[in-house]
Amino acid sequence: MSLDNVLAQIDSTLDASLARLFDLLRIKSISTDPAFKDECAHAAQWLVEQLKGIGFDASLRPTPVHPMVVAHARSARADAPHVLFYGHYDVQPVDPLNLWETDPFAPRLVEADGAQRIVARGSADDKGQLMTFVEACRAFMANGGLPCHVSILFEGEEECGSSSLPAFIAANKDELRADVVLVCDTNMWDRRTPAITTMLRGLAYEEVEISGASRDLHSGLFGGAAANPIRVLARILAGLHDDDGRVALPGFYDGVEELPADVAAQWRALDFSEAAFLGEVGLSVPAGEKGRSVLEQVWSRPTCEFNGIVGGYTGEGAKTVLPAKASAKVSFRLVGQQDPDKIVKSFRAYVASRLPADCKVRFTGHGASPGIALPFDSAHLQKASAALAREWGRDTVLAGGGGSIPVVGDFKRDLGMDTLMIGFGLDDDRIHSPNEKYEVTSFHKGARSWARVLAALAE
Amino acid sequence: MSLDNVLAQIDSTLDASLARLFDLLRIKSISTDPAFKDECAHAAQWLVEQLKGIGFDASLRPTPVHPMVVAHARSARADAPHVLFYGHYDVQPVDPLNLWETDPFAPRLVEADGAQRIVARGSADDKGQLMTFVEACRAFMANGGLPCHVSILFEGEEECGSSSLPAFIAANKDELRADVVLVCDTNMWDRRTPAITTMLRGLAYEEVEISGASRDLHSGLFGGAAANPIRVLARILAGLHDDDGRVALPGFYDGVEELPADVAAQWRALDFSEAAFLGEVGLSVPAGEKGRSVLEQVWSRPTCEFNGIVGGYTGEGAKTVLPAKASAKVSFRLVGQQDPDKIVKSFRAYVASRLPADCKVRFTGHGASPGIALPFDSAHLQKASAALAREWGRDTVLAGGGGSIPVVGDFKRDLGMDTLMIGFGLDDDRIHSPNEKYEVTSFHKGARSWARVLAALAE
């Protein structure tokens, strides 16, 4: 096995790699909407076939929701380290569909700002990213075999709470145990600078429905006398932040620690413009906790956000209705030692405490996972960091990350494994938004990066 | 003309009257949704044909939205008083459709609690009510003619803000001017006790849309740093009421007067159970201003209600999105001398004052009309009150009313005419809600009541 040959093969077969990615992007694997259940199964089966084609022992594993894909391939070197790669084949819903310039499931290449972009739902999150690893493995297999023993786990519920994942990991501990986990679901520092994400915020996601009268009422006949669930809900939501932008739930900040001084210094030294970060999405004022930098607000501080709200008449024009119910989706990004279950409990108690005697509340949990952090002195981290620097010609940034990847916490808790989060997304990839894209450079050099990282971990 | 003959004819032709009403109920005249524009025109044309058939000079009058119906018929007595009857042929939307037991536009008779009910959208609001007057006129025409000169105005925009009405009245003052206006769009006191509504709350209806970032964002990447329009909106809505349930807008209570002592005493003496009124819709605690009776809260006090709210992801499951915008429908019930325009202005200024620098707001007005009140010493009121008492065998309650009928204010302002609001709806008619109904007794004795009122006004 020669790394140079592997890299050369990745370069010379880019078009074929892109064609395979496009096949995967055409599959509408929206996991949160039951209408797309078959499409999720289709995406999983497609991945099984691909991995078998490369030489993996791959199989589909049913779950109560969407199937897992598990695959294994061994290195010729028996004492090689063993890595477990994780990715997810499911994607976010595409609404509002009218804001997409073209069909979200008809991938296309677009030239913009001097770069080639792959535009499609899932191009960056996470199909394009996971395929960088698959293509690196393919190149090794065609050039003497893998430098590490490689196991792969692809799930199809990352965008809808990963409800099947904890039980699946618990039931398959021996099969999934490895020396380190590799995850490709994060961003570069910028388009030229690689990054390894060493901190990830956790997520607790709650749906809360307030109901009042037994039916919708006429606001003229009952207005003033009848409880209005929208009013109750607005009051509850408005009380969740204080005037300084801090979350007002009792005990919310238990387990939230200040950054170590050296990490804080590294972050301050980063080439990061708050104005540019917010300006790119049309904003200018940091909306989080007062006195915190934007990087802290999105990397190392917990939040409470409202992801959706609906109640009453939402069509065109006016309707003088007092609705019987109103609901909101509320999520918390968690850091450090914050306990997701305690925070869900605190939230539910807070809502109940603000509920008028006349109203009822119904909660639906959509997952709860803690924040996680990788030790800065990890040998895997050092080797991967150096490998990435060789590919990109720049030092690797050891970054925080705002999003949640619950599986990283599961691997740590259930199998004691640390995770290297290495990804090639960019901040303007518009993940979860219309016109999501992934740069061809991310895809191509991403595959090259994984080749270098696998080789480095085997040294 | 003998009143007895007229009443006997109403009794003997009830089945044919019901069949005509069912024809009208089958027309899907939902005025707020542009998809039903043709159905609204169809309902108007149907009424023109009916009125012509009775002997009225009736015509369709186009407007920028939905057409008016105007009709005239004279009494043989040249010096008879002249009444203008107003009703509306448009209906509310039918959502949530799944809560209807049968098609809202397939009217049917149902036996319940020993009474016959007409179940359909619009059965009570307002097609069933307006047809009581048409059927009374039909019976007079077949028995020697009308006791009063009668003009009729039916509009098709009552449920969507009546935007064409003020200009139409202003342009047709001479044609519409009469001695008194009759409106049939209110309720009885209970199923055995007639009522004339002498006070009506006005309505100012605003739609407010808050926008933040230029697109939907990932709550992991931006959560904490980016403005969240749902959070901004919830804070704005939550600030609109104080802890005592009073509306917190500056100047909101300007022009709101306490009830005269005698009216307050009459209301206290009414056989009204707050527990039963709220209990019928599954509630138990008056939600309005503290220290006010429920009758005050729904009849003589102004309100601020939230009729609808929407933002972000509202589908099944979880989506970690920070929405680019969120919107709410907010309406105010107005009383006394409250100035609707000043209140709209105050509301918009309040919202603007609570808007973060990063966010934008867009307002859409859906109408603004003042509250109105009929003098208790009106001769028309005394005559009509006595006529109703003769039909029902009980004293007529002089009631307040919570709903808004903007046209009543327009008639007062533009033509100096007072309005007698006489209706036969019941509190459990579920207007604006699924399974709306109108009692056959309301329809039948409603027509008889109008016959008696017309005869009394002519005395």
Image (cartoon, coloured by chain):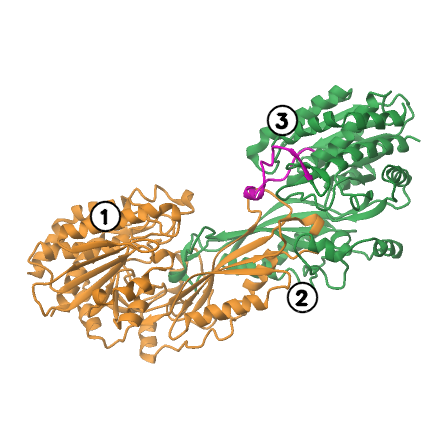
Chain colours: A orange, B green
Part of the protein shown in magenta: B88-111
Find residue A46 and name its label: 1
Q: Secondary structure at mark 3?
A: helix
Residue A278 horizontal/vertical position (percent): 41, 60
Q: Is residue B428 visible?
A: yes
> On the rendered structure, is B187 left or right of A449?
right
Same chain for the residues under marks 2 and 1 in the image: no
Q: Is residue B369 above or below residue B274?
A: above
| Distance between the alpha carbons at the discs numbered 2 and 1 | 58 Å
| Distance between the alpha carbons at the discs numbered 2 and 3 | 48 Å
Q: Is residue B56 above or below residue A23?
A: above
Question: What residue is pinned by disc 3?
Answer: B42
Q: Residue at x 14, y 50 (%)?
A: A53
| Distance between the alpha carbons at the discs numbered 3 and 1 | 55 Å
Question: What residue is pinned by disc 2?
Answer: B243
Classify residue A65 by image quadrant: bottom left
Q: Amino acid at mark 1?
A: Trp
